[in-house]
Image: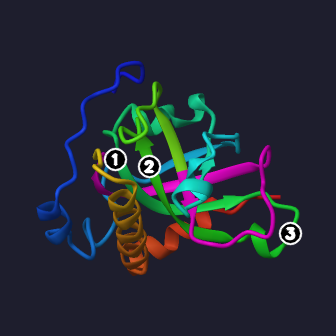
């Protein structure tokens, strides 16, 4: 995928929302997954937590190359861990990741925004994060309203949780753990 050219994204429709499955992908990851990403968490646009109620951790542009070179813009699921100072926040957690241009916000560059399914005690900018991407949920879409985007994000989270409960996916959570 050319990370310098923003492709057009289809507009999200009510028909799409009603037809979304509750679980996606095969019973175990298939090529090109798993894909491991890592890097220090950077400041993003500040929209995830403030505007959408879904805080995200942003990886540096160069760390998303392994994913963007073999996949398309869209929403993915897997596991992630932040090398946090707090032992409780240092666990491996399920995650949902948006890889794309965020057409609702008209981004000018490709980003990978990871939402860990855990409420952290404090921010972790500059801390190292490791993620293993295991599957694809849906394509990147454009939205007519912020509310429609939020609704799909919440559906993405539920789909990711269901997908990651499968035994063949659970074993990948150990691939995120930092080794001493």
Q: Is residue 57 above or below residue 66?
A: below
Mark before the other along the chain sequence, 2 or 1: 1
Give the labeled residue for mark 3. 86
- Quarter of the figure with residue 20: bottom left
Residue at image coords 81%, 63%: 122
Q: Nearer the viewer, residue 71 or 53?
A: 53
Q: Nearer the viewer, residue 104 or 118?
A: 104
Q: Marks 3 and 1, Cα distance to the nearest angstrom?
A: 31 Å
Q: Does dot 3 land on a helix, a strand or a loop?
A: loop
Q: Marks 2 and 3, Cα distance to the nearest angstrom?
A: 26 Å
Give the labeled residue for mark 2. 98
Comparing marks 2 and 3, which lies closer to the viewer?
Answer: 2
Mark before the other along the chain sequence, 3 or 1: 1
Question: Is 36 on the left-hand or right-hand side of 104?
Answer: right
Q: Is residue 132 above or below residue 3?
A: below
Task: Give the image location of residue 121, x and y in percent.
Answer: 79, 70
Neighbours of disc 2 within 10 Å: few (<14), some (14-19), many (20+): many
Q: Which mark, residue 74?
A: 1
Q: Residue placed farthest to the right in the image?
A: 85
Q: Does dot 2 land on a helix, a strand or a loop?
A: strand
Q: Does dot 1 land on a helix, a strand or a loop?
A: strand
Task: Give the image location of residue 60, x and y in percent.
Answer: 63, 34
Mark before the other along the chain sequence, 2 or 3: 3
User: Dividing the image into 4 quarters, which one contains the C terminus?
Assistant: bottom right
Question: Is 43 on the left-hand or right-hand side of 97?
Answer: right
Q: Is residue 70 magenta?
A: no
């Amino acid at each position: 995928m050319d990370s310098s050219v923003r492709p057009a994204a289809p507009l999200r429709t009510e028909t799409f929302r009603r037809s979304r499955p509750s679980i996606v992908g095969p019973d175990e990851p298939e090529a090109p997954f798993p894909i491991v990403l890592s890097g220090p968490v950077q400041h993003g646009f500040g929209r995830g937590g403030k505007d959408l109620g879904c805080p995200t951790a942003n990886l540096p542009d160069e760390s998303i190359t392994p994913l963007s070179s073999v996949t398309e813009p869209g929403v993915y699921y897997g596991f992630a861990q932040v090398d946090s100072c707090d032992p409780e926040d240092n666990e491996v957690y399920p995650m949902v990741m948006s890889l794309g241009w965020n057409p609702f916000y008209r981004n000018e560059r490709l980003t990978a925004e990871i939402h860990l399914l855990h409420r952290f005690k404090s921010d972790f900018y500059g801390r190292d994060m490791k993620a293993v991407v295991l599957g694809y949920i849906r394509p990147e879409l454009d939205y007519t309203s912020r509310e429609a985007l939020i609704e799909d994000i919440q559906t993405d989270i539920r789909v990711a949780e269901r997908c990651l409960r499968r035994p063949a996916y659970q074993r990948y959570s150990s691939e995120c753990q930092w080794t001493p």
